[in-house]
Amino acid sequence: MSPERLKALLDEVAAGATSADEALDRLRDLPFADLGHTSIDHHRELRTGLPEAVYGAGKSAEQLVEILERIRDAHHRAMATRVSRRKARLVGESLPGVRYDPVSRLLLLGDSADRRAGPGVVVACAGTSDLRVAEEAAQTLEFLGHRVERLTDVGVAGVHRLLDKLPVLRDAEVVICVAGMEGALASVIGGLVAAPVIGVPTSVGYGVSKGGETALHAMLSSCASGVAVVNIDNGFGAATVAHAILRGANA
Amino acid sequence: MSPERLKALLDEVAAGATSADEALDRLRDLPFADLGHTSIDHHRELRTGLPEAVYGAGKSAEQLVEILERIRDAHHRAMATRVSRRKARLVGESLPGVRYDPVSRLLLLGDSADRRAGPGVVVACAGTSDLRVAEEAAQTLEFLGHRVERLTDVGVAGVHRLLDKLPVLRDAEVVICVAGMEGALASVIGGLVAAPVIGVPTSVGYGVSKGGETALHAMLSSCASGVAVVNIDNGFGAATVAHAILRGANA
Amino acid sequence: MSPERLKALLDEVAAGATSADEALDRLRDLPFADLGHTSIDHHRELRTGLPEAVYGAGKSAEQLVEILERIRDAHHRAMATRVSRRKARLVGESLPGVRYDPVSRLLLLGDSADRRAGPGVVVACAGTSDLRVAEEAAQTLEFLGHRVERLTDVGVAGVHRLLDKLPVLRDAEVVICVAGMEGALASVIGGLVAAPVIGVPTSVGYGVSKGGETALHAMLSSCASGVAVVNIDNGFGAATVAHAILRGANA
Amino acid sequence: MSPERLKALLDEVAAGATSADEALDRLRDLPFADLGHTSIDHHRELRTGLPEAVYGAGKSAEQLVEILERIRDAHHRAMATRVSRRKARLVGESLPGVRYDPVSRLLLLGDSADRRAGPGVVVACAGTSDLRVAEEAAQTLEFLGHRVERLTDVGVAGVHRLLDKLPVLRDAEVVICVAGMEGALASVIGGLVAAPVIGVPTSVGYGVSKGGETALHAMLSSCASGVAVVNIDNGFGAATVAHAILRGANA
Amino acid sequence: MSPERLKALLDEVAAGATSADEALDRLRDLPFADLGHTSIDHHRELRTGLPEAVYGAGKSAEQLVEILERIRDAHHRAMATRVSRRKARLVGESLPGVRYDPVSRLLLLGDSADRRAGPGVVVACAGTSDLRVAEEAAQTLEFLGHRVERLTDVGVAGVHRLLDKLPVLRDAEVVICVAGMEGALASVIGGLVAAPVIGVPTSVGYGVSKGGETALHAMLSSCASGVAVVNIDNGFGAATVAHAILRGANA
Amino acid sequence: MSPERLKALLDEVAAGATSADEALDRLRDLPFADLGHTSIDHHRELRTGLPEAVYGAGKSAEQLVEILERIRDAHHRAMATRVSRRKARLVGESLPGVRYDPVSRLLLLGDSADRRAGPGVVVACAGTSDLRVAEEAAQTLEFLGHRVERLTDVGVAGVHRLLDKLPVLRDAEVVICVAGMEGALASVIGGLVAAPVIGVPTSVGYGVSKGGETALHAMLSSCASGVAVVNIDNGFGAATVAHAILRGANA
Amino acid sequence: MSPERLKALLDEVAAGATSADEALDRLRDLPFADLGHTSIDHHRELRTGLPEAVYGAGKSAEQLVEILERIRDAHHRAMATRVSRRKARLVGESLPGVRYDPVSRLLLLGDSADRRAGPGVVVACAGTSDLRVAEEAAQTLEFLGHRVERLTDVGVAGVHRLLDKLPVLRDAEVVICVAGMEGALASVIGGLVAAPVIGVPTSVGYGVSKGGETALHAMLSSCASGVAVVNIDNGFGAATVAHAILRGANA
Amino acid sequence: MSPERLKALLDEVAAGATSADEALDRLRDLPFADLGHTSIDHHRELRTGLPEAVYGAGKSAEQLVEILERIRDAHHRAMATRVSRRKARLVGESLPGVRYDPVSRLLLLGDSADRRAGPGVVVACAGTSDLRVAEEAAQTLEFLGHRVERLTDVGVAGVHRLLDKLPVLRDAEVVICVAGMEGALASVIGGLVAAPVIGVPTSVGYGVSKGGETALHAMLSSCASGVAVVNIDNGFGAATVAHAILRGANA
C-alpha cells in the first residue's frame, strides 16, 4: 500500500466515510510488507547510487537490453557484469549509448557518478592474468565515482616490486588485492597498510590452484589483520564492499 | 504496532483527535515489520503445534531448564534434541516433569499432542546402529500426535527382509528412511511405495562413508521418484517434514 | 506367473488333472518374484499417474522416440527431461503430437492429467537464472494435473519482495524453492509457511558456489523446520515429491 | 637372458670355449633385472592371454596403429580402449583387420581367445546410460574367451526387475555390477549371490553424483559381503579382475 | 508362505475342500516375498559358510553376547569385528568359549571351518602399522577354512624386499594387499602376479594421506590389471571377497 | 639503522669526520630493510592502536605471560585470543591486572582505548550457539574503543525478528554477521543495510555444515552487495576489519 | 634512490651545501625499498641465468611477443610455457628466431646456456601420456644448460622395466619423476637412488585420478625419503628446482 | 649372489667340478633379486648415512626399543620420529644412551654424524606454533652432520622481519620453509634466494586452514621458482630432501 493510498484511507476515516473498524480490517489485510517495501527500496536507492548490477552471464542480449533500459530509466545509470564481446555488440545495436570494455567485460549505461574526493581505492594485482578481475573492480568503482589507483604485477615472489609501491598503498582508503595461485598478496599487503584490505581470489592457475579455491583459503587464513575476502573472481563484489566503506567514510 | 494500538490510532482519527496526516506520519515511522511480527508468530504457532525444538548440543543444563520452561509456558509442551544422559539428569532435577529417552536423546516436557487418525508414518532403518537417529524421528512424531510404525534392520543387502514388509510400507502416509553406509534403502523403498519418502542419511560407517556424506549423496542421486532428503543424522528434521505433510493431508 | 496362469493351474488341481505335488513343484520353480512383479507394476501405475520419465540427456533422438511411444501406449502419456532443442526437433519429426518447451527442456506426449482441486504448489525461485530448473518442476506438476503458482525473483537479498508474496506462499499445499548461489531462500520460506518445503539447489553461480553444492549444503543445514531437499538442478525430482505429497493429501 | 641362452653360456664354459672370467663379465654386464625381466614377461604372457591393452584416450591414430601392430605380432591379438569413432576409422584405414564397436569404444585386433567352459560372467547394469561401460567390460571378456550374460536395466528403484533375474545371477561365476547415480546395485546383488561381485561405478548422473564418486563410495560402503570395486567407468579393469578370478577357477 | 503350508493348501484344492478361486485369493494375498525369503536365506547359508559377521563397533557387550549366541546356534560359528579389548573381556565372561585377538580385534565363537586344500591367500602389507587390518583379513580367512600366507613389511620404497617374495606371491590363488600412505603396493604386486589382487587401503599416515583416501584412490587408479579394492581398513571385506573367489575355484 | 644513528652519520659527514664515500659504503652495507623496519613498525603502531594480538591456542601459560608483558610494556595494552579458562587462571596468577571473559575466551591487559564517537558496529548473530564468536568480535572492538550494539538470535528462519531490528541495523557504520549452519544471515542483512557487512561463518552445526564450510561458502556466494567475509570462527579478524574501516571513516 | 643519487646527496652534505638535517629528511622520505630493489634484482639475475619464464596460457600472441622481446633484450634468452600451436605460429611470424616444440609447448628465444658438466638430471615418466609434462621439464633444463637423460614408460606396474634402468637412475644428480594415475613411481625410485627426487604428478587418468590430485597426494605420502613434489603438470617448476640444486652442487 | 660367489661357481664349471646343468639349476633357484638386493641395501647405506628412521607414532615402547637397537647395531646410529614424552621415557629406561627432545619429539641413539663443511641449511618458520615441525627438520639435519641456521617468526604479514634476514637466507645451500595458515612464506623466500627451497606446510590454523591443506596447496601453487614441497608437518621428510641435495653438492 503506497503512502498515497494509505493517506487516502486515513482521510476517509477522518471524514467519517470509513469507520475505524473497517480501516483496521483493510490494514490488517494489506499485504504484509507493503509499507516496508517502499521504504526499503527507497533506502536501497539512496544507499548505493548503484543500480542493481545485472549478472550478464546467463542472460540473452534481448533480456539484457530490456533490463538495462528499465534500470537506467529508474536510476539514470545501469551496468551489467560478465558480458561476452558478442553479446555486448548485440546489446549495443539496440542500446546506442552503452559502453563496453572487453577486459573487464562490463557493460555500462549512463554517466559515471560524480567524482568523489579523497585518495580512493588501490586495486593491486599479482599478474597480468588477473587483470580481468582487477578491471571489473576498478571500472565498477570509477563508474560509482571513486578514484582508483591501479598496481599491476606486484606478486609476492618479487616482494621488492611491492615495497616500491608502499607510498601509494599507504595512501589508499581501501586496498583491493586481486590474486590467484597462492593468493599471498593479501597477507603481505595486510601487514603493510592501515586501510581495510579486500581480497579477491582469482581462478588463475592450474592443478592445486583448484579454480581459485587455494587463493581463497589462503587469503582467509591470512595471519595479517584487517583483511576480508569476497568470492573467487568477484571483482564487482569487492567494488561494492569498497563503495560501502567509502560512503561511510564520507558521510 | 499491535492491532489494539492500531485500532486506538484509527479511533483517534475517526474522532478528529488526530489528523490523517499525523496518523500517516506515525504509521510511516512505525517499525517496519511490527504488524508482520505478530501475524507471523501467530501463524507459526497455529502451524506447527510444535514448540520450537531446542538444539541441546551446545547448551548447559541451566540454559536448557530456562528455555524449556519458557517454551512450555507459552505452548503447553517443549522438547530438546541431542541431550546427553548426564545433562538430562541435571535438567530433570530442576524440571521434575521432564521425560528423557537415552536412545533418541530427546528431552520432552508436557503431554504429547492428541493422537491423529490415519496410518501415519513408517520409520525404516537399515541397522541397529541407525536406531538413535530413527528414534529421534519416531519419538518426535509421536510427541506431535502421529502414529509411527518402526521397521528395523531392513537393509538392502538382504532385500527379502524389506519385501516382507511391503504391506506395512505401502500403507504408510509418509516413509522416513534412515540409513548410513551406502544409503541405498531410500532408493529401493522409493521404488516400492506411493507415499513421499524422506531420506535421513546417518553418520554410521567408516572410511569412504565419510560421516554420512556418501549416504547423503547416494540418497540425493536416487533414481527413484518421490524421494527428498534432510541433513545427516537429522531425525528431528525428517519428523518436521513428515509433520508438515500430514497436517496438509488432514486439513 | 500371471493370475490367469495361476488360476489355470489351480483349476487343474481342483479337477484332479494335476496333483498337489506337481503343482507345488511348478510353483516352487516359478521365478521368485513373478507374482510380485505384476503387483508392483500395477501398483506403480496406480500410484503415480506418472509414466516413468525418461532422462533424455544421454539418449539419441531415435531412442527417445522409441521409448516415449512405448510408454505412451501403456500409460496414455509420456515425458522426457533434459532434452536439447535440436534433439527435440528430431523427435518431433517422428512423433508429431509431442510438445517441447525450450526453457524447461521437457518433452511431453499425450494430454496432461485432469486438473486436481486445491491451491496446489508454489514454485518460487531466486532469480531468472534459476528459471530452467523452476520450469522443469512447474511444468512436470502441471502435466500431472496440479495447479502451480510461480514466484520469480524472490531472492533473500531483497527480502521485502518475498514478504510481499506471503499470502500466496501461505496458501500453498507444497512450496518448491529453487535457488542457486547461497540457497538461503529455503530457510527463509521454511520459517514463513506451514506447508512442506522442497528445496532444489541449482548450479547457478561461480567460484565457491561449486556447481550448486553450496546451495545444497546450505539448504540441508537450514535451521528452519519442514524443509527437505532434492539433488542439484533436479526440478523434476522435486515435482515427484510434491506429487507424492498431494496424492496423499487427496486420498 | 633366457634360460636357453644362459644354458648355452654355461655349456661354453664347461667346454672351455669361454673362460669363467669372460662368462662373469657377460653376466655382470647384463642389466640388473634381466633374468627377472624375462621370467616376468613370460609369466605375464602366460598369465593373461591378454596383450597389454592400450589406453587409447591420449594417443594419436598413428601411435595406435604402431603399438597395436607390435603387440599383435608378439601376442596374436591386441586391443585398445576408449577409442573415438573418428580415431577408429583412421586406424582401420591402416590396419585392415581391426574391429571397432562404437558403444564400448573398443578396438580389437586378432581373433578372440577360445571360448572357455562354464557359465561365465554376468554383466548387470542399472540403466541404458551405463551401457558404454558395461559393454567395455563384456566385450573385453568375450575377446578373452569368456561367456558373458548381459542384464540391462536392473536398477534398484525397480527391485522386482532384478529379482526376476535371480536364477541368471546365481548361476554366474562372477558378477560385474555397472551402476552410476547412487550405485546401490552392487549392494543389492551382493546380498543375493554367492559369487564375487565386482562393482564398476559410472560417471552417469549430475549434481551430487559427482562424476561417479557417489556411486564409487556407495559401492565401497556396501554392507554386503563379497563386493570389490574398480575405478569409475573402468569396465576394462573389471573385466581383467573377472579374468584373473576365472583363470584361477579353471586352473 | 512355507512350502508346507503351500502344500497343505494345494491338498485342500485337490480334495475339493477349497475351491480354485478361494486358493487363488489366498495366494494373491500372501505376502509378496514370502516364498523368496526362505529360498534366499537358504541360499545365503549354503553360499558363505560364513555366519553374518557382526560389526562390533557400535554395539554393547550385552548386545554382542545375544547376537553371537543366536548366530552360533543357527550356524555353528559366529564372529564379530572391531571389538575393543574391554568389550571382548565382558563378552568372554558371558560366553566362555569365545576367542579374542587384540591385533585383529576379532571375536570368534565356534570352531574354524575345515581347512580347504590349495595354496590359498597371500596377505601382504607394507608396514607394521598396517598389521591390524592385515590380521583382520588373515584371521577371518583362517576362520573360514582358508590357508593364509602373511608377507609383512614389503613396502614399495624397498622394492627388493617385495621381489624376494615373488615365488610366494606367484603361488597364491588370491593376493590381498594392505597398504596405507601412497598405497602403491597394489600396483606393483598387480604387475607381478596372475592371481586377482584385492587392495585394502588403510588409514595409516598423516597430512595428505587423509585417513586412507589417498591410498584408496591410488589403488583404484592403478595402471596394473586384475586389481579391485574394498573400503578403507576393511580387512574383513577383503576376506569375504577372497572367500567368494575361492569357493568358485573349488566348486 | 635508527634515525638517531643515521643522523649521527650525517653529522660526521657534515663535520668532515667521515667522507661521503665512507658514508656511502656504510649505508650500502646496512641490512637491506633496516630503515624500512623502523618505519613499518612505527606505522603499524600508529595504524592500529592494536597491539599484535596473541593467538593463545598453541601457547603455554608461561609463554603467554611473557609475550603479553612485553607487548603491554611497548603498547600500554595487550590481548590474547582463544585462551582456555584453565590457562587464563594460570596467567592471572602471574599477571594480576589481566581480565578474562570465558565466553569470548579473550584475555585483556591494560585499559581499553578511549571510546570513539559515532554509532559504531552492530554485531548480529543467528543463535546462542554463535555467541562465543560474536563476543570475540564485540569485546575486541570495545577494547579498541568502539561502540558495539549486539543483536542476538536474529536467524533467517524467523525473518521478522530481524526486521524488527532494522533501525538498529541501518544506523550502524559496520555490521558484523556471525552465523553457522546455512549462514544466510549475511545475505539478508546485506540486502537491508547500506553499511559494509563483514560475515563471520561459525563452525556451529553438524553433517553438511562441515565445520563452518557451508556457512562460509554461502556467505561468499551471497547475491547481496557490500558483503565480505573472514575465516570460520574468526571473530577477532572481523573486528580488525571493522576497526580498519572505522579508522578511515574518522580520519 | 640509486647509489649515484645517494652519493650525490652525501657529497652535498660533505660540501656543506645540504645540512645533515635536510639530508636526513630526504633519506627518511625516500621510498622504502629503493636500495633493496636494485640489489634484489641484481641477485635474481645472477642467481638463475633463467629469465623469468612467461606463463603463456592466459596471454595473447601480441602480449607474448612484447614480453619475450623485453626479457630477451635484458637477459639474452627468454622462454614461455604452455603455448598453443596456433599461438606459437603467430608469435613466430613476429619474432623470427623463436623456437617452438609442440610436445612440451615451450617457446624458446635465444641460445641455450652453455652445457654444464656432470651427469645431470634423469627425467623419468610412467607412460607416453605423461610425455608433455616430462618434455616441459627436460627441455627447460636443456635450455638452462643441463644434461638430461630421458626414461620413458617405466611405470610401477612393470617394475622390471624400471629396475633395468637402475644404473642410469643411480648416476643422476637429480631425478625428476613424472607420473599420473597412482603416482607410485616417485616412491619406488625414491627407494632406489641417493639423489634428490622431484615428483611431478600429472593430470593423466580418469575417475578417482581427479586431475592429478591422487598422484600428488600419493607422492607426498611417499614412505621413501628424499622426495619432494611440485604442482600438478608443473614440469617447468620441477626443472627450476633441479636447476637450483645443480647450481649449488657446482658452486 | 655376490660376484665372488658367482665367479667361484663359474670356476667350478670351467674346472668340470660342476656341470653346466647343475650350475643352471643353482642360478635358476637363486632368489630373483638376490644380486640386486645386496647392491640396493649396500647402496642405501652408503647413500644416506641415515639409518632408516622409525615412524614412532604407531609403535609401542617395546617395539621402539627393539627396532632402534637393531638399527643402531647395523648403522652406529638410529632415530625415531613422533615419539611422545611418555613413550620416550619408557624407551629411555631400557635404552640408556637414547636422547629425546620434547619439541621435535625425536628420539636419537648414537652420535651425530661428523659436521659437514659449508653454510648448510636455513630452517625458517612463520610462527612459534610451527616450532615442532621446524625442530624436527633442524635436529634431523644436525644428527646427519649438517649445519643448521634457524629463523623463527618470519611470517609474511611482517615482511620486514624477513627482509632483515636476507643475508642469512642468501648464504644458505638449502632453505626449508615451515609455515601453516596461508603458507605464503615459501613464495616470498622463493623469490628472494637462489638456493632450492623446500616447503613444509604445517597443520597450524583453523577453519579453512584445513589441517595444513591450504598451506600445502598455496606452496604448490607458488609463483616463485625453485620451490618443492613435502607432506604436511613432515619436517623429517624435508630434512631427507635437504640431505640428499647436500650430499650431491659435496660429492
Image (cartoon, coloured by chain):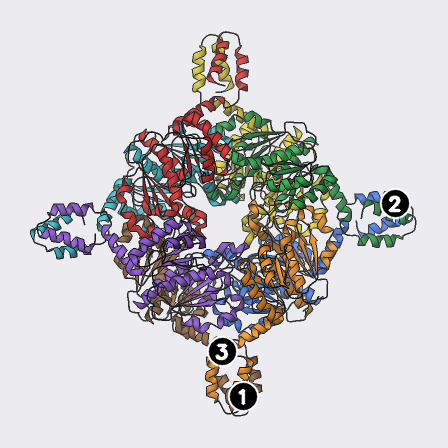
Chain colours: A green, B blue, C orange, D purple, E brown, F yellow, G red, H cyan
Mark 1 vs mark 2, foreground winner is 1
* Amino acid tagged 2: Ala
Q: Determine which residue is flagged by label 2.
A: B20
Q: Secondary structure at mark 3?
A: helix
Mark 3 or mark 1: which is in front?
Answer: 1
Q: Amino acid at mark 1?
A: Asp
In the image, residue H181 sits, relative to residue C147, either above or below, namely: above
Tell me residue F10's x, y (percent): 49, 13
Q: Is residue A158 visible?
A: no
Q: Nearer the viewer, mark 2 or mark 3?
A: 3
Numbered tag placed on residue C11 in the rendering: 1
Q: Position of residue G9 (x, y in %)?
A: 50, 13
Q: Which residue carries the number 3 mark?
A: E35
Looking at the picture, do discs 3 and 1 lie on one chain?
A: no
In the figure, is residue A44 to the left or right of B85? right
Asked whether disc 1 touches disc 2, contact meaning CB atoms under 8 Å apart, the reply is no
What is the x, y in percent for residue F78?
56, 33
How far is disc 2 from disc 3 in space, using C-alphas? Answer: 81 Å
Q: Residues within 10 Å of mark 3 (few under 14, many from 20)?
A: many
Q: Quadrant of residue F113?
A: top right
The image position of residue C59, as x and y in percent, is 53, 60
- Measured along the vertical axis of the image, is residue C39 above or below residue E212? below
